[in-house]
Amino acid sequence: MRHIKIILFAFLAFIAPPFFPVIANAADATNAPAPLLPGPNDGRIAYMTARLLEEFHYSQQPLDMEMSKKFFDGYVEALDPRRENFLQSDLAEFAHYRTNLDAFTIGGRGRADLSPAFDIFQRMLQRLQEHTDYVDKVLKEDKFTFTTNERIAIDRRHAPYPKNLAEAQQLWLQRVRYEYLQEKLDRETQPPTTASYASSTNISLKPTNHVVLSVTNNAPATNDIAGTIAHHYDWILHTISKWDGADILQAYLNALAHAYDPHTDYFPPENAEDFSIGMSLSLVGIGAKLTEDYGYCTIASLIPGGPAAQSKLLNEKDQIVAVAQSNLPPVNVVDMELTKVVQMIRGTKGTQVQLTIVPAEDHTARRVVTLIRDEIKMEDEEAKAQLIEMPDSHGGTNRIGVIELPSFYGTVNMPDEIVHSPKSCTEDVARLLKKLEQEKIQGVILDMRSNPGGLLNEAVNLTGLFIKSGPVVLARDPDGKVAVLSDTDNNELYSGPLVVMINRFSASAAEICAAALQDYGRAIVVGDTSTHGKGTVQKPTPLRPFVWPATAAATNDPGTLKITINKFYRVSGASTQLKGVASDIVLPDILNYSTEIGETSLENPLPWDTIPSATYDKLNLAQPYLAQLKKDSAARIATNQDFTYIRQDIDELKKLQADKTMTLNEREALKERKDNRARDKARDDERAARKSPDEKIYDLTLENIGQPELPAPEAMLITNSVTYSYDSNIANFFGTNTAATATSQKSEVKPRPTDPTLDESENILEDYISLTSSNQGLIANHE
């Protein structure tokens, strides 16, 4: 197995964003599907995946009985996350699998027996059919009155599975009644719009770099609530019924990978390509973001400058019903899985693709649009900056810069045939910093809130922009060997006052950067109590050389295993795993109190530990001022109205998380909605009555920083930015303070969301600048 290790370590190291969605495949399932069977190579793929995990995962954990239990439980949870479809009798029937998946997977001669994966999936499909049939019956027969004091348990992820079908039906009944009530209240309390089935839409708490496509399912317009809900259930069943063997293999192998840790994943070929695109911020295609709308590939938006936008023949909400390559016949893509449609539309730069379109304004019309594929830059995901001018306390003006870094992106050419243009977040931030320095800024805020991570080398290099040289992060391998990753260029691009903003969604590479700048005493870390707590390193390992090395060129791509191979540590020796990076100055935020955010909320995380510290020069630039900065910040927060609103929201979240139920009484639910709406209106009115801040904001992008003059300053109009999101899982209620970001160079008035966390970070930076300036003056006078 030594040759495996050599190949494994030849691939690019990265620290992946901590969350990757599993996207289902699709195949025609108009009639009752025949029992699915594994593909001819699936057993070999599963076997090699398991052996690679045993050999190279950081934990060095063999696939034994204990891992088999985690494997089984994870697969069942993936298929039935609400624990409402599988019966306890089903799990008892499959109990022999639970303790023997190790033998099924690696006990054969180079091939796994995948019968557990397919048997369990087939039973889930049976239960889902029963669930759908029962809901259809209820929707036809139930009178749907909501006058009792009944409440529904929203969070069932840790609840017992139903004992039998009768108990499951009680859960299904309660669930559909809740959904009916929510849809009814939506229609009665919202302005007339296209009816949508919103009550069961899951709102993800987890950031992702998959910005090219998204999947949404909006029910068709209908005045019949029962019809809307029935259509939704039928669509779920239809979608899952179209799973093929590749989908089952993906779900099964991800359950195996996640038994080792939450960030080890199995990627089918298209997901590996999406990762490469997300890191490189570019793709070759037509420049359209697509959604799936009940079987129809629908244009959600057009990327400016892309072939689709330049053609002026495509619009938002147009539907793509067929795709043709050059002069080949068109392929019908109605009811085709979105990722497959996207793969057909993407291709080689300079090649032709033809789309058959159903226009949004006339669903009876058809037109064919011919486009030439080109490289699409995802400029919205690039680093950007703001230059902020504000009066100081002495009658002068302060100039500070805010750099927003969405991720630690950089060129990743993982699929051999896809080559992206060179891209580096470090180079982009360096360009923004140089522009800000030219504009004589006195301090910088590096905003890494909700930055999910990215490439390890970019984290090291970007940190090096703020220090002269030295170790940035330590990486420990499974054998205990520690590698020191350092900035070695001895060139500090920016040496002035620095504040780093983080929140509970800041993860991985963002934690490396924040931790190093904090340990050096180079920056003040401001924000949530801590970052996410992902302190592990992954490597993408294509499976092709291991599955069939002799015929790799002639065989279909078996996918990629993204495997955790290192833990990283701060230069102080402490791991960021689980605990993350704690803020020097903690600001009120509802995310601090969510029990479902952070590494500790995930299954099978690796533990926290420490190793010996590296040798580095502690600059101690921030520590002398922290006590005073905390005191002044606390005084402002105590009287800040936006933080008062946040504290009220925190109290509400605590109640919701403690209760974990929702009312099925219509009068009570309507009162809650009216109270929430009145509260939000009062907040909006209060904000609208405020005097606009006495400051100017200049939006800087990588496109406009080369211009000799600054863009026109952004006009100010304050709006409510605190958003509230409810979904089927009460733990996914949260409020966030959305950062104000803009790229327009026009001077018209536009909404600027309130962002009390950013505002207070600006105040902290101003105080920091003032304290350091005073201290330098005292030193100069003394000398």
Image: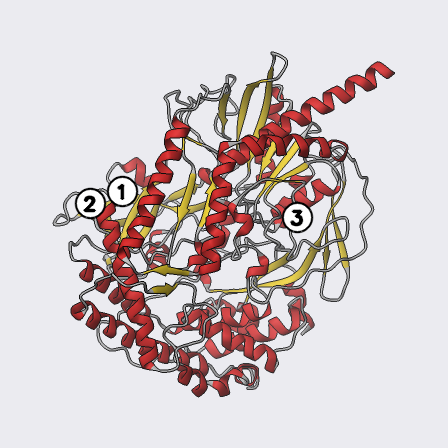
Residue 126, given in percent of the width and then of the height, sits at 31, 79
Q: Position of residue 112 (x, y in %)?
A: 51, 81
Q: Residue at x 52, y 84 (%)?
A: 104
Residue 316 numbered mark, or none: 1
Labels 3 and 1 touching (C-beta < 8 A): no
Disc 1 to disc 2, C-alpha distance: 8 Å
Task: Give coordinates of residue 344: x percent, y percent.
Answer: 34, 56
Q: Are marks 2 and 3 in contact (CB under 8 Å)?
A: no
Residue 660 vs residue 776, the one in the foreground:
660
Q: Tell me the amino acid under the disc marked 2.
A: Ala
Q: Are marks 1 and 2 in contact (CB under 8 Å)?
A: yes
As drawn, is 447 to the left or to the right of 34?
Answer: right
Disc 3 from disc 1: Cα separation? 41 Å
Distance of label 2 from label 3 (alpha carbons):
48 Å
Q: Which residue is mark 2?
A: 360
Q: Residues within 10 Å of mark 2 (few under 14, many from 20)?
A: some
Which amino acid, mark 1?
Glu
Q: Quadrant of residue 66?
A: bottom right
Q: Residues within 10 Å of mark 1 (few under 14, many from 20)?
A: some
